[in-house]
Amino acid sequence: MNKVTKIALLGLGTVGGGVYKVIQMQQEEMERKLGTRVEIKKILVRNIQKAALKVKDPSVLTNDVKEIMQDPEICIVVEVMGGIEPARTYILEALKAGKHVVTANKDLLAADGHILMETAAEYHCDLFYEAAVAGGIPIIGPLKSSLSGNHIKEVMGIVNGTTNFILTKMTQENMEFSDALKLAQDLGYAESDPTADVEGLDAGRKMAILASVAFNSRVTFDDVHTEGITKITAKDIRYAKDMGHVIKLLGVARNTDNGIEVMVHPMLIDEQHPLASVNDSYNAVFVRGDAVQDTMFYGRGAGELPTASAVVGDIFEIIRNMAFNCCGRIGCTCYKELPIVPAEETSSKYFIRIRVEDKTGVLASIAAVFGNNSVSLAQVIQRSRREDCAELVMITEAVKDRHLNDALTILRGMSIVRDISSVIRVD
């Protein structure tokens, strides 16, 4: 094997900069771990002058991708640009040139992962993407190898650190959503435009990838039902706590007899659940298999060095495959074509908070609407009275989403109902 393995980075932002740092940190250990030294020969950047401040040798910088694609010495391309284009074009070009690829691009994989995987297989290349889900937590590799002897029944997790930080502050410090979001932005956990995080879109893309790998059937972002945390209030969190629950934004994917259920939404989970104690910006993924039963993977779900750790781990894996001429041994694992269960056909228990007129017969009228729409109530509590208005907090039995929505539509049209303040799933 060559004593030097030459690679290229596409991008030198947060993750790219982290990859550069980790490889520098590993230089002395690489020959013992791999039998070769990893050399970053080229880094594609937009602004060479600005990027020069981040590297030891500015001569590695380029803004011409051809210098990477047409260089036969570069055998691994690491895409850490993000976004759909030009990342998609560059990855396909690299694979067609016989170069192996590592990517952290969840947006691209959740939309067009099958195209990338098929191209990698056609050109006998490795395409690894551990860093695309849960940052530094190893989860893709274990699902494809260590847990491959299982029929995976469920993957559930906290896969977005920004929303978990916000909900943690709302829980521990009684903050409202807007205040917790501002704190997250001030500390650098949330972007100036936090939509992808707080509306569940980022988590939805990650769950599409996880479901595809776990259930061996293609799932895209468009298949994932997403709800965010913008409607969660400090009052909801207090009520949940009183009932022995915490509220988390969860990605949930289940392999059922009717097909794959895959959603992202806030959920009340029992305070004894393993995910309940995952706080701040940490991530955790809970996996249930028929043989292994329950396992949980926990750690930093984002950040410069944790994400870079996953990227560099993939680079090392490819180099080991190259040494034994076995690249492409674990490619696309989506050999099934399972249907996606529409969200309205899934079932869950629900926490519902309603403000109603404080007068005789109101509760009976509301219970009748629920009963007429196949919604059974497990618990009803009248929590407060103010200005001729009472607040009802209810927990339902498991009910199909469409039946609950039918009932809520009728309730919103009733004069005795002031507003339906919260509707949150319960595990």
Image (cartoon, grey):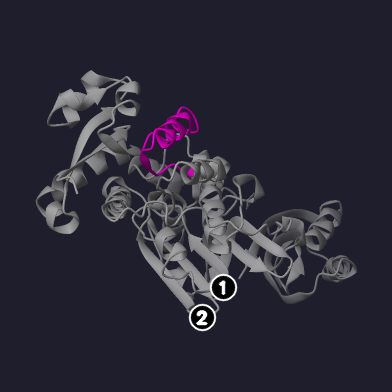
Indicate whether 7 appears above or below 249: above
Choose between 295 and 416: the one closer to the eye: 295
Q: Is label 1 in contact with label 2 (beta carbons under 8 Å)?
A: yes
Amino acid carrying label 2: it is Ala
Tell whether position 175 is magenta.
no
Q: Quadrant of residue 175?
A: bottom left
Looking at the rendered structure, which numbered label has been put on residue 151?
1
Q: Horizontally, is 383 left or right of 61 in the view? A: right
Looking at the rendered structure, which numbered label has been put on residue 291?
2
Q: Which residue is drawn at 58% across and 58% down?
A: 266
Indicate whether 345 appears above or below 70: below
Q: What element carries label 2?
A: loop
Region rendered in magenta: 79-106
Q: How many marks?
A: 2
Choose between 184 and 206: the one closer to the eye: 206
Tell whether position 98 is magenta.
yes
Q: Horizontally, is 423 left or right of 4 in the view? A: right
In the rendering, at what x and y percent does residue 85 appear? 49, 29
Q: Horizontally, is 188 left or right of 228 in the view? A: left
Which quarter of the figure is the C terminus placed in? bottom right
Amino acid carrying label 1: it is His
In the rendering, at what x and y percent does residue 353 appear? 68, 62
- View extreme (left): residue: 28
Q: In which quarter of the image is residue 100?
A: top left
Q: Horizontally, is 231 left or right of 344 in the view? A: left
Mark 2 crowdedness (10 Å alpha carbons): few <14, some 14-19, many ≥20: few
Choose between 12 and 351: the one closer to the eye: 12
Indicate whether 408 appears above or below 64: below
In the rendering, at what x and y percent does residue 131 appear? 38, 50
**Mark found first going from the N terminus, 1 or 2:** 1
